[in-house]
């Protein structure tokens, strides 16, 4: 996110809550069985609890999860759980308050820690923690983070840094790879692969022969595109078949087409969902010399 970002601002380009719910309702009718609310930061949305409640109230309601930086969770974890949220992912890259300030430009480490505890207390478990390791910044913390997560009963997942940063400074040469993460963890822990990964982006490993697990998402060096069953809807109403898509399918224009009836709009939105799924490419191509990063950063796509 921009370092000077202040607050969520409504815009005529963004989907209204009613428009968002209609699109999700159509998606569920077409077979989508899980909805994840992401960002940017979804908890900045003033009506986020209402959105969760309305999605949870749909016929054949999907499993509902949310990814957040955790800062507003101390106050919102319980209302979100009551509204129907099933599970939560919280981004946290370090156990050091000073490093947290360096990474985020904000002194909000304690808020995130308190938010994680509030999520656990509210029953949003397993509470998952997403961590990105950066060279010479926090890449020495992998074992300590796992020890902490095990003590707190959080489910930790390490994610390779992807070329989706707003500043465009991603460098493949400085990437902390899945192999390096595995090697670092293996210095202190015995890791055994979990069978049956399915479409999950994370490779899961049992820890020291127990049922506790840790995940590693090798988005760059171990792509899982062949099993991916996800599509994305941006806040301004564009469908994307992949985080790295350079094309989008507009559903906002369908909703706002005054010449179409409500039934025609639903039919067209369903058709655009099917088209997006059919056009999913076999891979994101990050490791190809011809790779072109999408013009939108992660904060504008929905991670």
Image (cartoon, grey):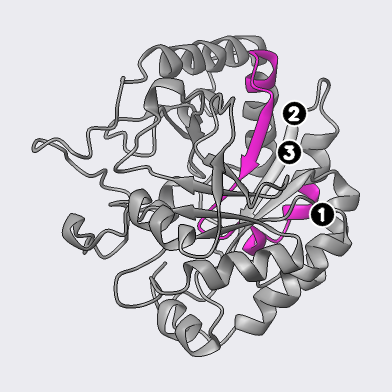
Q: Could you give the CA–CA distance between mark 3 and mark 1, rounded to whole angstroms?
A: 11 Å
> Which region of the structure is painted magenta?
27-50
Asked if marks 2 and 3 touch (Cβ < 8 Å), the reply is yes
Residue drawn at point x = 66 percent, y = 10 percent: 263
Is residue 224 among what the camera can see? yes
Farthest residue to the left: give it.
Answer: 289
Q: With 29 as the anchor, is 245 left or right in this view?
A: left
Q: With 38 as the anchor, is 84 left or right in this view?
A: right
Residue beneath disc 2: 62
Q: Could you give the CA–CA distance between mark 2 and mark 3, rounded to whole angstroms?
A: 6 Å
**249 is higher (above) or lower (below) than 16:** above
Tell me the element at label 1: helix
Residue 278 covered by magenta stretch: no
Residue beneath disc 1: 80
Is residue 303 among what the camera can see? no
Q: Position of residue 107 (x, y in %)?
A: 55, 88
Depth check, front residue: 23 or 36: 36
Q: Position of residue 149 (x, y in %)?
A: 66, 65
Mark 3 or mark 1: which comes first in sequence? 3
Residue 64 tag number: 3
């Amino acid at each position: 996110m921009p370092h000077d970002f202040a607050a969520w601002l409504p815009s005529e380009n963004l989907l209204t809550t009613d428009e968002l719910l209609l699109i999700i309702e159509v998606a569920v009718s077409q077979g989508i069985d899980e909805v994840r609310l992401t960002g940017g930061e979804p908890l900045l949305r003033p009506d986020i609890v209402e959105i969760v409640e309305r999605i949870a109230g749909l016929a054949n309601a999907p499993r509902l999860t949310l990814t957040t930086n955790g800062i507003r969770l101390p106050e919102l974890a319980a209302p979100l759980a009551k509204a129907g949220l099933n599970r939560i992912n919280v981004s946290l890259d370090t156990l050091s308050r000073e490093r947290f300030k360096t990474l985020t430009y904000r002194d909000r480490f304690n808020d995130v820690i308190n938010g994680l505890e509030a999520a656990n207390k509210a029953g949003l478990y397993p509470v998952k923690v997403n961590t990105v390791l950066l060279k010479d910044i926090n890449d020495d913390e992998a074992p300590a983070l796992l020890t902490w997560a095990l003590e707190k009963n959080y489910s930790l997942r390490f994610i390779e840094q992807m070329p989706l940063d707003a500043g465009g400074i991603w460098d493949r040469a400085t990437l902390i790879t899945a192999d390096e993460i595995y090697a670092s963890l293996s210095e202190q822990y015995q890791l055994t692969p979990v069978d049956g990964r399915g479409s999950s982006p994370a490779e899961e490993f049992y820890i020291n022969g127990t049922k506790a697990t840790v995940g590693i998402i090798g988005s760059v060096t171990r792509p899982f595109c062949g099993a991916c069953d996800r599509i994305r809807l941006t806040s301004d109403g564009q469908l994307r078949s992949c985080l790295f898509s350079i094309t989008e399918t507009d559903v906002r224009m369908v909703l706002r087409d005054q010449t179409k009836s409500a039934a025609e709009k639903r039919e067209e939105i369903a058709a655009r969902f099917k088209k997006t799924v059919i056009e999913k490419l076999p891979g994101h191509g990050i490791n190809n010399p011809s790779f072109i990063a999408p013009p939108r950063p992660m904060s504008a796509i929905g991670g």
